[in-house]
Image: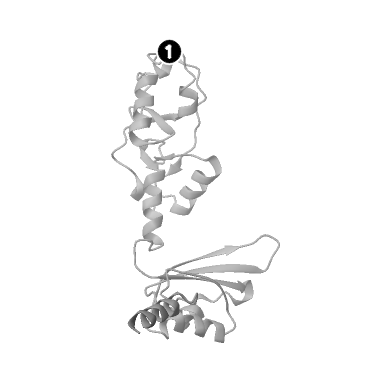
Amino acid sequence: MFASELISNTIPPLRTSDTVQVALDRLSEFKLYHLPIVNESQFLGIVAEEELLEVRHPEEALGGLSLTILNPFVYQDAHVYDVIRVFHQLQLSIVPVLDYSKNYLGIISIHNLIDYTSEIYAVKEPGGIIVLEINNRNNSLSHMAQIVEGDNAQILSSYVQSFQDSTRMEVTLKINKTELSGIISSFERYNYQVKAVFNSTITDNGTEDRYNSLMNYLNV
């Protein structure tokens, strides 16, 4: 996925002739904390809501103020991982997208990014989640997929979390079924450590047994 494919066409940029109040109203409308300033197709930078709120006269034009203008952007063919890195490092709510002539193409908002990540991680798809703790030498997704597919299931998405100064890793698997007992047993049989299970139909807290006992008592 390239940056150009994540551009939002619903959020217009600010111009230097816009007032502080216009900027604040637009930030509120789109629930953002940053907006780009663009004249024609020239990207001038990003202005932050926290600084605009300190302006005493909101009727003043942006071009007449001494504002701290941030200048982060990504090129149109940047990978989505690079986009996420810019969001994370600079704690932004938008990232501008430029072509290689430095012309402004649009912005990616944090809302677009969240929607995209929910799709690639199959968040909206029904299923269960298994978190495995493994050694980095045992990180074979193909073997994990074989185990899951052996139970007539499929991995919808996966991601790996590593830990600094450690060979330990966590692998999170989203699987297209909620009955996970067979898959869990298979992982344990192959010496995988199952650290956590979510959205599973497995119940081991005795609730069902207590319910059945109560029903039997009431039927006496």
Can the viewer see residue 13? no
Residue 21 falls in image quadrant: top left
The residue identified by callout 1 is 57
At 39% from the left and 16% from the top, the residue drawn is 61
Residue 12 falls in image quadrant: top left
Can the viewer see residue 53? yes
Left or right: 53 as drawn, with respect to 103: right
Q: Position of residue 160 (x, y in %)?
A: 54, 65
Q: Is 16 rendered above or below residue 158? A: above
Q: How many marks can you see? A: 1
Q: Position of residue 201 (x, y in %)?
A: 40, 75
Image quarter where the C terminus lies is bottom left
Q: Is 25 rendered above or below residue 133? A: above
At 42% from the left and 86% from the top, the residue drawn is 150
The furthest residue to the left: 10
At 41% from the left and 44% from the top, the residue drawn is 110
Q: Is 49 rendered above or below residue 107? A: above
Quick one: 86 or 73, which is closer to the camera? 86
Q: Is 184 rendered above or below residue 61? A: below
Q: How is the image coloured?
A: one colour
